[in-house]
Image (cartoon, helix red, strand yellow):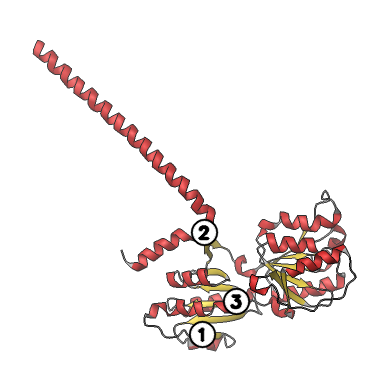
Amino acid sequence: MGIKKTLKKLGRFFIALEQKDEKVIEQSILIVDNGYSWLKDLNTAIERIQDYFPKAEISVLTFGDRKNNLQKDFPAFNYIPPSQRIKPRRCRIALQMFMLRKGRYDSVILFSLDISPLIVALIFLKSKIVLYNQWGQWCSLRLRNVSEISKVTHVKQKVKFNLKNLLKRIGLFFVLLQHKDEEVLKHSILVVDNGYATFGQISRAIQRIKESLPWAKISVLALEQRRELKENFPELEIIQPDECIIRKYRIARHMIRLRNNKYDYIILLSLDITPIIASILFMDGKVLLNNQWHRWWSLKPKPMRCYLIAIPKFILNIILNIIILIYLLISVSWISLKRSFNIFRFNLLGKRI
């Protein structure tokens, strides 16, 4: 068995391939309005979100009285009012967000640093967190790494000292908040062309990305200089991989060098195993496949529970096979015994006659 086939079999064991529809690139966004921001500011922010994500599926988590005002300007949105049974009222938004944790939103837009929704968003929602504050600034939010604990990225506002503000300051110690203006709404995308895809396939993939994410910065890592690609999409960044002794590993090796670019999406155009391994093991962005039939697939490592379940399933299969084997041995032995007994009886009766 060749190395390539062995790697493919290992890849199927460790990597989950799941077919997706067009929404995987069109985005799903949750806007969290906890009632603290002015409706005018909220409307302005939503209009900017629509500009950056024209085909996105947008859901708005808000209270019933504000929902009626927002529906007049944005009737196509999916509105989610928090349950009235949740007490106290100030925790309704956070608890409703927790109930929506399986919604798989690509981005969550917050409009204040209210501590309870912030905790739920950072810990339970595996999404890109964006803050639009009262000064009209766009910020990114995420939990700090160990190396970033002492890093200061924003100017602290002077507020009066009370328990709520103290808890907020403690919470922000673990949160990395960075002012990025509207850059935070733009996506950085790497399209990987390892020479197997046709120009039509690459062109169609880039067109679909631009239709859904018109402000995205798209880079193409390609083995060959595709002049027609640059002519049709002059804004693209074409990256040529460095030379490598083994040509088919050039793309994967250069992908590892690009890991610090923090791409939001890595889009593959074939199931070549080395770029898949490089993107999943060394890059943080979501890995998607756009195949020659223009269908979208997601690639990600299989969760640990799959391996934990595989062990008892393997043991159970062995036990079942042993039971089946014992049953077959008993059945064959019994049939053989009956046959031998019938032959013996026939011979015995024959001698008597």
Instruction: Using the image, determine if residue 286 lies above or below residue 65.
Output: below
- Tell which of 320 and 295 is nearer to you: 320
Q: Nearer the viewer, mark 1 or mark 3?
A: 3
Q: Which residue is outermost to the top?
A: 352
Q: In this view, does 285 lie to the left or right of 10?
A: right
- Tell which of 95 and 223 is nearer to you: 95
Residue for badge 3: 262
Q: Where is residue 239 in the image (x, y as percent from the top left)?
A: 51, 85
Q: Is residue 272 visible?
A: no
Q: Residue at x 69, y 61 (%)?
A: 123
Looking at the rendered structure, the secondary structure element under dot 3 is loop
Q: Position of residue 256 (x, y in %)?
A: 50, 77
Q: Residue at x 37, y 35 (%)?
A: 323
Disc nearer the start of the sequence (2/1): 1
Q: Position of residue 15 (x, y in %)?
A: 48, 62
C-alpha span from label 2 to label 3:
22 Å
Q: Nearer the viewer, mark 2 or mark 1?
A: 2
Residue 239: mark? 1
Type of amino acid under label 3: Lys
Instruction: Using the image, determine if residue 233 lies above or below residue 111.
Output: below
- Badge 2 local density, few (<14 within 10 Å), some, or many (20+)? some
Q: Position of residue 349 (x, y in %)?
A: 13, 13
